[in-house]
Image (spheres, helix red, strand yellow):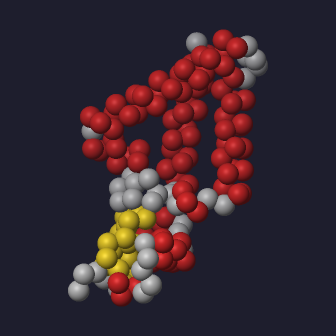
Amino acid sequence: MNVIIRAAAAYVFLLLTVRLVGRRLSSMLAPFDLVVLFLIGGASLSAVLGEDRSLTGAFTAIGTIGMMHVLVSWGKSRSNWFGRIVDGTPVVVFERGHWHDDRMKMLRLQKSDIMSAIRQRGLQRLEQVRYAIIERDGKVSVVEDQE
């Protein structure tokens, strides 16, 4: 039972930590970002299992984390409020020629990150962009200006 409580607590803690750390564009993960993810995973594993090195303990921890994920997914499907807490909301960072620097700072993104996504869409100038939006999953949506 102790492994179950620690696994559930670790899941909630990691969920909150990921929300606080902010969104990072998945296509722009640097090697160090991956190292940090692995370190978090390793630290969580030892904290969840503690002294229990048994296969049963590992399966119990994995099962608990899986069930926590299902529970969170269920909560998101039932409540928009809960979904906004867990996943956040889309954030407009560029709008009709104007950068929202405060939002960029909050998301820990730089203009060069957004410009890269704009260029990947085949656009060459900011005048061609109406909106750049950071979606809940960290991807950039670019809405072209049709004028």
Residue 81, how many percent across, how many down? 29, 44
102 lies above or below 124: above
Q: Residue 111's spot in the image, x, y percent?
A: 51, 77
Residue at 60 percent of width and 21 percent of height: 61
Residue 11's quadrant in the figure?
top right
Q: How many marks?
A: 0
Identify the image quadrant of the N terminus.
top right
For residue 55, above or below residue 31: above
Q: Residue at x 49, y 64 (%)?
A: 107
Residue 32 seen in the current view: yes
* Residue 87: image location, x then y, percent: 41, 48
Q: Quadrant of residue 139?
A: bottom left
Residue at 53 percent of width and 22 percent of height: 64
Q: Which residue is drawn at the image coordinates 71% and 57% (left, top)? A: 32
Q: Residue furthest front?
A: 122
* Residue 31 in picture, x, y percent from top left: 70, 57
Tell me if residue 73 comes above or below residue 126 in the rendering: above
Q: Quadrant of the C terminus?
A: bottom left
The residue lying furthest to the left in this view is 147
Q: Is residue 114 left or right of residue 58?
A: left
Can residue 3 be seen by looking at this rendering?
no
Q: Is residue 68 above or below residue 14?
A: above
